Amino acid sequence: MQPQLHFSTPIWHYSCSTSNMKELNKSLVADAYKLRKEERTQSVSGVNSWQSHRSVHSLPMVGAFFSAISDIITTLLEPHGTPNLTFAVEGAWFNINPPMSWNERHNHRGHAYAGVYILQKPTDSGELLFHDPRVQLTAVPAHPPNNPLIDGQRRNANAQVGDVVIFPSWLEHSVSLNKSTGDRVSLAFNMGWMDK
């Protein structure tokens, strides 16, 4: 007998590792470092890290990124909307996590979906972790580990350079400690629905 899964949480994970995207990544990383020289951190969840302002989606290279993945996002999210709606980027920002930095557990309330695109990730520079939203499980005695049906813990997204991860904005997530000697760089974004 197979269990019925109720209250499951969708997480979409897509690899964008084409040669065109690799060239775009270089430009996006350069944009992130340029902005870091020009502005103070706008960090919301980062510790010892830098986050840009929340409107980098207006920059040409970031706009090119969203154009490049628009069909992917539409294909992923369309079944969860209605035929007369499409997605809209409601904010985007760069994250630069240097050695010994991390992002605390948080969510992106006020939006339908959140996402992250991994631009640079040295070995041991931190992992995107999703936290089980079933808070009642903290009151249950320990179960065998890694059983997602009954184990209220966190899950590693295993996101690599060139990967886009999209998830409901209410899902709590964090980034673990950067134990490397290099910077972890990503582009985070929020999305909502708009009329077609």
Image (spheres, helix red, strand yellow):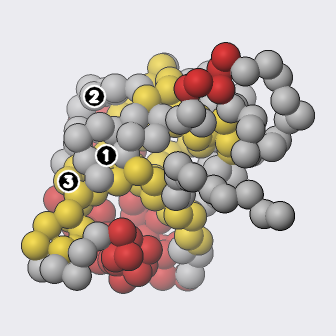
Q: Name the residue under label 3.
A: 90
Residue 17 shows up from this direction = yes
Of callouts 2 and 1, the N-terminal one: 2
Task: Indicate the secondary structure of the residue bearing disc 2.
Answer: loop
Between the residue at mark 2 and the residue at mark 3, the CA separation in whole angstroms equals 17 Å
Residue 186 % position (x, y)? 47, 49
User: Which one is in front, 89 or 130?
Assistant: 130
Determine which quarter of the picture holds residue 139: top right
Nearer the camera: disc 1 or disc 3: 3
Q: With respect to residue 27, does 116 lie above or below?
A: above
* Residue extending furthest toward the front: 1
The answer to whether the residue labelled 2 contacts the one labelled 3, judged by CB atoms less than 8 Å apart, is: no
Q: Residues within 10 Å of mark 1 (few under 14, many from 20)?
A: many
User: What residue sits 48% from the left and 20% below the top?
Assistant: 47
Q: Name the residue under label 2.
A: 42
Q: Could you say which disc has been placed on residue 93 in the image?
A: 1
Amino acid on which disc 1 is placed: Trp
Verify CB contact (< 8 Å) between mark 2 and mark 1.
yes
Q: How far apart are marks 2 and 1 (CA)?
A: 9 Å
